[in-house]
Image: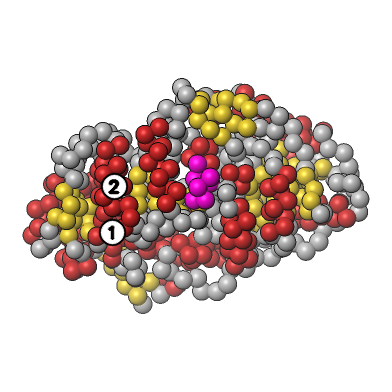
Amino acid sequence: MKEYYLIEMKDLTTDELAVAVSLQGIVNRDNPDIYLTRENGMEMHWVDWYKQYGYEPVASSIDEMLGKFAGRLKGYILYDEDVPDTINVAASLAGLKDAVICAPSIEEKLRSLGLECLVDLQGKFKGRVEPYQWLIDEYLSEFDLKIMANYDQKDKPRVQPDMDYLIAHRGFCLGLTVNQADYPEEAALWDKVQTAAPNHAIMLGWHTPRDSEATHVYFASRHNVSVFCGYATNTSFHQHIAASEEYKQDHCEHSECDPNGKYAAITLSDGDSWHSMVDVQKKFWLNPRRGEAPVGWEVAPIFAKAGPAILEYYFKTKTDNDYILCGPSGISYNYPSGIDDLDGYLKISHDAMRKCSLRSIWAINRIVRHVPGGGIEHTLKDEKVVYTRQQMEEFGGIKDQKGADIVDDDVIAKYMEAMPDALGFFQGWERIPGENPHWCDGRLWSPGSSLVRKDIDGAIREFEESAERQSGPVFVCAHVNCYDSDMDVILETIKRLEEKGFKVVRPDVFLRLAQDAYARGLVGK
């Protein structure tokens, strides 16, 4: 048995948590030694899972861990409680200098352990931009920028759940918008950093309230930076637990299409985000009704490195009705029309997918930019539309009527060429209005027809509208909105679709049916 140390977060103050997360990052660089648990989190699920890999937890405390591992530290970074963004600067410097993040209330304790202050950030800065401008001017050249993060700090400085991974990999973090239209000074700093980063560097964290998800992802895509929605605890620990065998799942080899059939495939959204990977697909995976009907599940193939045994969990516990796909839009969450080095991105994605027994991808593809006043312009098939942030969050409004994704024929061709063993592809988070299936050399690129949600009537209506536009056998696919549904909603939607004459199948079966329909001249000619 390999022992490791378990610290309960509920026993820590906010200031002690900053020390614990940064200590965890330093200590876990080479071995899985420290693991943090939340009172209502999923951390104990993985504690139990890891026992079969020979890992046994030992209860500990932050004081015990500081005493045991103080020799691994070179000191501490003191942040300014009155300037919340200095905690991000402290996190960057903690990884670089093998230090822990320190609030003034903790300084005396760290000094008693023989640690000294390496950088004091108190009283140096005002506002949001000054701390980051200083960090860039003084230290940017010392970072390899392979790992970055964006952590929005609000009224009080707080460590973020995946800061341990950032610190373990000596990553660089800011807390700035990429909104060039309204906050050009902030966006210019991110432009400088991401331009300096190597192609396919990793971006953790998430966007600020001053951007949208779409602009955050598109900006990174333009810089060839791989985006991951992070906020997963203990990733510095998870990265070390190796899978016990190769990732394997069965793939449908052939399925005969009914010329008059109506086929549907449903996939849970957002499973590729790091927090969903460690929260067991937002607990959908733990529902006892999972397996009653065919459902697709997205994963992040990067977890072959970031959490190998977590990724293995999904393959080992899936049912015959579960099918695992690659989340948007490959190795990471990026918009392919915006990626400068798309060929390189697709090669990395294909290699990762082959390693992880993944033969399909849900893509999301948006071309966006901020416009002055907070609007976000989307380039669509026939027009450009500016949405407010409120409109981007609404269902049934203008965004639902016009859409957010663009179906790009050049992108489709590149995916098909780069991934010859992929069964086919899906696109969209919500539906893409007016788009029908696209065919490329006999394989299907299937734009989203609906978004499964608690409004089951609305979702069914969208399936039917898409079916009415198609002749011959019908192929409609949909994401499940994981934030506005549960397993009962999914199963009730499937039941009602079948009552309407649809046959709901696994995503791989869906794609094989489409291949058969094309080969027999039923579609796409």
- Whether residue 421 sits left or right of residue 346 in the image: it is right
Query: Which residues are drawn in magenta?
Result: 219-225
- Tag 2 near tag 1, CB within 8 Å: no
Q: Which label is found at residue 96? A: 1
Q: Is residue 212 shown in magenta?
A: no
Give the residue displayed 56% in from the left and 25% down from the top: 387
Q: Position of residue 418 (x, y in %)?
A: 68, 59
- Above or below, 37 relative to 354: above
The residue type indicated by label 2 comes to Asp
Mark 2 to mark 1 CA distance (whole Å) = 15 Å
Lower sequence index among marks 2 and 1: 1
Q: Position of residue 376 (x, y in %)?
A: 53, 29
Q: Observer-nearest residue: 497 or 327? A: 327
Mark 1 neighbour density, 10 Å: few (under 14) some (14–19) many (20 or more)? some
Give the residue displayed 17% in from the left and 60% down from the top: 75
The residue type indicated by label 1 comes to Leu
- Above or below, 64 relative to 474: below
Residue extending furthest toward the bottom = 1
Q: Which label is found at residue 137? A: 2
- Whether residue 121 sits left or right of residue 287 in the image: it is left
Mark 2 neighbour density, 10 Å: few (under 14) some (14–19) many (20 or more)? few
Residue 410 showing in the rendered view: yes
Give the residue displayed 57% in from the left and 25% down from the top: 386
- SS for callout 1: helix
- SS for callout 2: helix
The quarter of the rendered structure image containing the N terminus is: bottom left
